[in-house]
Image (cartoon, rainbow, N blue to C red):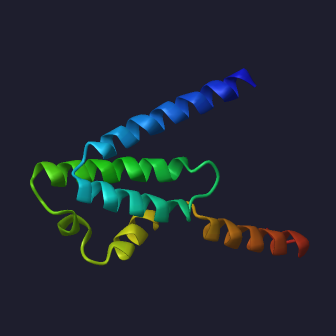
Amino acid sequence: MIEMIKKLMGDKKEYKMMMARVDALPEDYQFVFKKIQNYMWNFATGNGMDMLQMQYELIDLFESGAADGREVLEITGDDVASFADELVANARTYVAKYREDLNQSIMKQLGKK
């Protein structure tokens, strides 16, 4: 139990550090990041750690773009939803989990592997 509490506290600290990086971005970048982040959480499965890794990569990309003086939409394009979809394309999502669970349950019942 103590190990779990330590992990949760560490995860919370790590998340706060990540968000401090976001807060250091220009306002437009912050807004777009938070909107994409909120969108991404709709697809997270399990503890969401795969989404956090993608968010770190997005922060890196946004920090680089901001440092180069680029507008945020130059990075994402005007279709930000498609950009976000590309980010989560390789993540383990609830949809993928549901599909996997459906197939496994049927194969188990029918005695196939």
Residue reaching furthest to the front: 27
Residue 43 position within the rendered picture, expressed as x and y whole percent measured from the top left:
56, 64
Q: Is residue 90 visible?
A: no
* Corner quadrant of residue 8: top right
Q: Is residue 10 left or right of residue 105?
A: left
Residue under the image location 40 percent in, 63 percent down: 35
- Say above or below: 1 vs 88: above
Quadrant into which the N terminus falls: top right
Residue under the image location 70 percent in, 70 percent down: 98
Quadrant into which the C terminus falls: bottom right
Frontmost residue, 2 versus 27: 27
Q: How many marks?
A: 0
Residue 51 position within the rendered picture, expressed as x and y whole percent measured from the top left:
49, 53
* Corner quadrant of residue 94: bottom right
Q: Is residue 101 visible?
A: yes
Residue 99 position within the rendered picture, expressed as x and y whole percent measured from the top left:
68, 73
Residue under the image location 42 percent in, 71 percent down: 85
Residue reaching furthest to the top: 2
Q: Is residue 30 left or right of residue 95?
A: left
Residue 89 position within the rendered picture, expressed as x and y whole percent measured from the top left:
46, 68
Residue under the image location 57 percent in, 51 percent down: 48
- Say above or below: 77 vs 22: below
* Corner quadrant of residue 108: bottom right
